[in-house]
Image: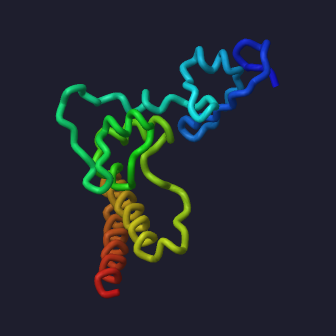
Amino acid sequence: MLCQNCQMKDASVHLKQIINGEAIELHLCTDCAAAMGYSDMFGIFQAPFGRFFAAGNAPGASETRCPTCGFTFSDISHSGRPGCPDCYRVFADKLMPSVRKIHGRAVHTGKIPESAGKAAQNERRLRELKAQMDAAVAAQDFERAAFLRDSIKEITDKEGNG
């Protein structure tokens, strides 16, 4: 397959980017990939994630550390990945814009595995019901809002007793 950019060399770098749920694929030669800002990592070209996380990183400022792994936001921006799951909570204000940019959204909307248990499924259901209730109130559909409120109460009561 030829490079989509120069149409002269064989494509050896294959990128897939999802923007607002729409997949875009690029097939580039190494020269065009380097010229477009993709860095050499692990011997292959990969997106320069440091650029995604660099925003909001004030040099010289005393940095917050994750209490679990000890990473700072600078560590995340240099490595391109958080040190542990708690980093997402500690650095949420700085990471979420980048997560949205990379994934198109910052909330998991896929399936919940059975192993996650009833609590995770109920939590997701409650979020959905609350959003529907807010929409019903905004549309002044108070009967539907009351029904949704009762459904939310039923789920929270079961969680409290179960």
Q: In the depicted view, which residue is nearer to us: 129 or 54? A: 54
Q: Nearer the viewer, residue 33 or 156?
A: 33
Q: Residue 91 in the image: state x and y as whole percent.
A: 30, 44
Residue 162 picture location, percent across and down: 35, 87
Q: Residue at x 61, y 29 (%)?
A: 45
- As displayed, is residue 118 above or below residue 16? below
Q: How is the image coloured?
A: rainbow
Q: Is residue 110 left or right of residue 26?
A: left
Label count reads 0
Q: Nearer the viewer, residue 159 or 55?
A: 55
The quadrant in which residue 130 appears is bottom left
What's the residue at 41%, 61% (across, down)? 128
x then y, percent, for residue 34: 60, 18
**Which quadrant of the figure has residue 29?**
top right
Residue reaching furthest to the front: 43
Task: Farthest residue to the bottom: give it.
Answer: 161
- The picture places residue 75, in percent across and down from the top left corner, at 35, 38
**Above or below, comparing residue 162 to residue 70 in the picture:** below
Is residue 120 placed above or below 131 in the rendered structure? below
The residue most toward the right is 1
Toward the viewer: 149 or 96? 96
Kindly identify the residue that appears in the image at 36 percent across and 68 percent down: 148
Report whether 27 appears left or right of 66.
Answer: right
Image point (40%, 74%), residue name: 119
**Could you tell me which quadrant the N terminus lies in?**
top right
